[in-house]
Amino acid sequence: MCGIVGYIGKNNIKEQLLDGLRELEYRGYDSAGFSIMKDGEIYSYKAVGKIKNLEEKAKDFNIDGDALGIAHTRWATHGKPTEINAHPHFAEFSSVVHNGIIENYQSIKQKLEKEGISFLSQTDTESIIKLFEYNLKNDAFEAFKTTLNELHGAFAILLLTKKDANTMFFAKQGSPLLIAKNNEEIFFASSDAPVIGKAKEVIYLEDGDYGYVKDNEIHLFRNHKKTELSWTTLPENKEFAQKEGFRFFMEKEIYEQSHVLQDTLMGRINENGVNFEEFDKSFFEDINDITICACGTSYHAGMVGSYLIQRNARIKTNLEIGSEFRYKEPILDKNTLFIVISQSGETADTLEALKMAKNAGLKTLAICNVDNSSIVRLADKTILTRAGIEKGVASTKAFATQVMVLWLLANYLGDKNETEVMLNTIKACEVTDKLHEQIKRLSKRYLHGHGFFFIGRDLFFPLALEGALKLKEISYLHAEGYPAGEMKHGPIALADPELYTIALLSKNLLFEKTKSNIEELSSRDSTILTISCENIETTDDFIKINESNHYMIEFYEMMVITQLLAMEISIRLGNDVDMPRNLAKSVTVE
């Protein structure tokens, strides 16, 4: 996830910016850069990869005395992770860093290109700085305001221009940005972490805020009127700052899912459907069927993908567990597309399966969160999930983005346009205070007993598997996922008041059949929590989701609920949610 740092002062500005970027490394990134304004000149450095690469490029650059600087870590969205696409972005005499999405960047770009203005990068951010200079006639602040009014989407912006060389412009809409101060130093950042220990007071900007800093004076505008500065005290705990106020990284990552899904979709959907810059339709020529291979949570995402690809693209899709695949003497056909899924790109079992497929001459596609990982380097093509770094061992946002990528792929292969539905899933993943409080209260009723069944039908079956896995990973309680229709074929023998059933009931897929399966368990006195838009009176507890006309919106809303439920049960049991016993984030052994 991208990060922003800004500094105004005279205390070794290059190191101030680099230190700030290091504090944002936990968010994940693939390139970094900075611009410094000194005596009317802008000096810029950018590098792909880790911050140490940027340090090396700028090792001979030093600036003393008063200066203004902006810096950025980028997680690739629009455009590949290249130096040209890295921030800051430039025009003729200005520089900008930006977090978020400029939804109308294509129309801005087309307008400016008709005026003879050229673009270098593949990013939406470059449209900001080119538009700013296009609007700049006399007053830089007026040009900045005009530019903001033309931007649609989410953004946190820091901008420098030689036309007003002692000024830093800033704006916030939908992406986090703060201002901090310490004596004669002023800091900007996208989270607390870069400024803790350097500043004591902070202003957390609100959506719609914008302004500028000139001669060490902050001019803040709210609702288009200059407003008084209202400072609060910074927290002192750096890890707390990285968690952004949440109790655990897992909790933060559950809340982040609506944002990272937006990043996953960015540049890949439009009013005409799905488009991938990673490949074109020719890559899929001569493909008769698909095999998806993965482990753990990624396997569950792959199972969802198998339903979606067969339903939307009408291509036969097989599913394989990575740890079993090599030992079953698989029959590999060159007309099979072999898809591997891994959060880290280093999962040993999945990597070895990919090597087998490559050696057999199959076309290979990786769905992964980490660019330049082993699996990404080996596969023919890759779709990056753009989840950002995930510190909680139990995966949440990585699963959400893997499913979204597979849904995109299913629609791409089937020429199916569900853009509006996909955008609606972003809102479905937003966590409300009311929902979270309800789950906190319910969790105390599900601490004891002899186990959990998570049940669902169709693609809610793999979600049941994932919900059960989340619970067992962090609570250490026994949990199993089952197809709801399979309960009567044996598992229902366990039904009694101490068996807890989490029922995923979709209004849009097999509602009556799943409802009947729930009632079978209810009549045998199982304790049942139903997650649905419709309450089943015979069940014990009910979490209501919003009514929708598409099963994927239901899927994502239920996904968030099962994640929160697992987390709250685990917290009540006193467990370390982020570091569950016996588990590793990246499983690099067979």
Image: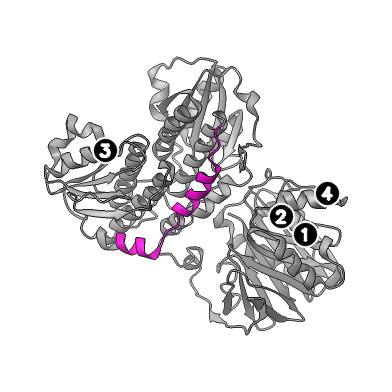
Count residues near mark 4 (Cα–Cα under 10 Å), then give few for <14, some for 14-19, many for 20+: few
On the image, the x and y values in percent for residue 330 come to 43, 17
The quadrant of the picture occupied by the N terminus is bottom right
For marks 2 and 4, give the CA distance: 15 Å
Is 318 situated above or below 376? above
* Picture quarter with the C terminus: top left
Instruction: Specify the label residue 512 is tagged with.
Output: 3
Q: Are marks 1 and 2 in contact (CB under 8 Å)?
A: yes
Residue 566 relative to residue 93: left or right: left
Q: Is residue 17 above or below residue 558?
A: below
Q: Give the residue type at disc 2.
A: Thr
Q: Residue at x 58, y 65 (%)?
A: 176
Helix, strand or loop at mark 1: helix
Q: Earlier in the sequence, mark 1 or mark 4?
A: 4
For residue 125, the mark is 2
Give the amino acid type for the residue marked by disc 3 in the picture.
Glu
Asked if residue 420 lies left or right of residue 159, the reply is left
| Amino acid marked by disc 1 | Ile
Answer whether residue 117 is visible to the viewer in this image.
yes
Marks 1/4: CA distance?
A: 14 Å
Crowd rating for badge 1 (residues with CA inside 10 Å; few <14, some 14–19, many 20+)? many
Predominant secondary structure in magenta? Answer: helix
Report the span colored magenta: 416-439
Q: Are marks 3 and 2 in contact (CB under 8 Å)?
A: no
Q: Secondary structure at mark 4?
A: helix
Does 157 lie within the magenta span? no
Which residue type does callout 4 highlight? Glu
- Between disc 1 and disc 3, whose residue precedes? 1
Question: Dot 2 lies on which element?
Answer: helix
* Of marks 1 and 3, the one in the foreground: 3
